[in-house]
Amino acid sequence: MPPALPPFDFSRSPFIVIWETTRACALACVHCRADSIPRRNPHELSTEEGFALIDQIKALSQPPPLFVFTGGDPMRRPDLPQLVRHAADAGLIVALTPSGTAAVTRAKLSVLKDAGLSRIAVSLDGPDAETHDAFRRVRGSYDWTMRIVETATDLGLALQINTTISKLTLPQLESMAARVSAFPLSLWAVFFLVQTGRGAALDQITAQDCERVLNYLYDLSLTAPFGIKTTEAPHFHRVIWQREHDVAAEGTIRVSGIRRRGLRSPRSVTDGNGFLFIDHLGNICPSGFLPLVRGNVRTGNLGAIYREDELFVKLRDTSALAGKCGRCEFRDICGGSRARAFTETGAMMASDPLCAYEPGIAARTLALS
């Protein structure tokens, strides 16, 4: 049988917290879950409210969760350096996901690094300007993204590339892998489309395509000098376990593959289960892809809502899973995408439509071996 739940107590604290500092963005990306807007909302959290949010995040656990400033485009906030400094002074590991625009200059990134920024994550959804700019709907985005990559590297910031997998981008997967391999990456984060926001207009890949992509990423992870993670495809952890069992059966060294993959957590980090999202208005949600509001940081306690709210508790209860996710022997290390289940079926705890695995196969295989 698959391994028991690892010693990560996601019932007490999330592994990562994302703050959508603003929804304002100069891009109009076809997959945008936030449905970004051209101007900042006057009701966004203020600087002082941002400081208070950061203090609540610090209080969640020791060490505190990873913390990401996102958007929209967080570079649209002039107080970003102060917010980064407050988070860094609080002991948080601070990351930033700016949009690929001319707003990201060397001078601004240098200020942010001096303020305590640890990592920068940029989106790249095509191996060349033509395909990336078409996805981002703004000509020049690819070139701006390349400048961000070069500047972040020169400044010594850890670099992460985010790539979305949909039917539109799937044909470029191998060329994308070759492109990102040319960068001094710490992590390639592969996002699997959830059809929400503007992403509702995009076509989803099939479950069989997803299985092939996850196995391709596993193979790449064995030789790539950077880590690989998936977002909204937690069944990557099931694929890893299955492939590691195969490797072990062949007598090769299992630990080598785990080291090279650089996995941050041996189980999935997903909607409300190790993952916590605060939107630009301070609303507390399980994730940006599952924007079900469960409170607001202006009036509620972040830790209490994450630990005690009925919906958050249910999202961490694998016995509440329905359909084949509920029967699956990998439910404790995977659990399926709750955001995709909700978006595509209307039932939060239903089976993840993007998983091709039929429960019981691994158990039967092990019984025969």
Image: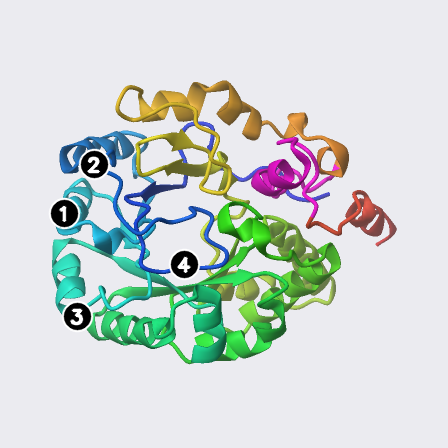
Question: In this picture, which residue range is highlighted in magenta?
Answer: 328-353
Circle 4: element type: loop
Identity of the residue drawn at 81% across and 43% down = 360
Q: Is residue 106 visible?
A: yes
Identity of the residue drawn at 51% across and 79% down = 178
Residues marked 1 and 2 touching at CB (< 8 Å): yes
Q: On residue 109, which mark appears?
A: none
Q: Nearer the viewer, residue 296 or 301?
A: 296
Q: Earlier in the sequence, mark 1 or mark 2?
A: 2
Label 2, label 3: how far apart the Cα atoms are: 25 Å
Color style of the picture = rainbow
Mark 1 nearby-residue class (10 Å; few <14, some 14–19, many ≥20): few
Residue under pointer 4: 28
Q: Residue furthest front?
A: 38
Residues marked 4 and 1 touching at CB (< 8 Å): no
Q: Earlier in the sequence, mark 2 or mark 3?
A: 2
Q: Amino acid at mark 2?
A: Gly
Residues marked 3 and 4 touching at CB (< 8 Å): no
Q: Position of residue 241 (x, y in %)?
A: 65, 53
The answer to whether residue 333 is magenta is yes
Q: On residue 106, which mark appears?
A: 3
Q: Earlier in the sequence, mark 3 or mark 4?
A: 4
Judge depth for marks 4 and 1 and give the one in front: 4
Q: Position of residue 42 (x, y in %)?
A: 22, 37
Residues marked 2 and 4 touching at CB (< 8 Å): no
Q: Earlier in the sequence, mark 1 or mark 3?
A: 1
Q: On residue 50, which mark appears?
A: 2
Circle 3: element type: helix
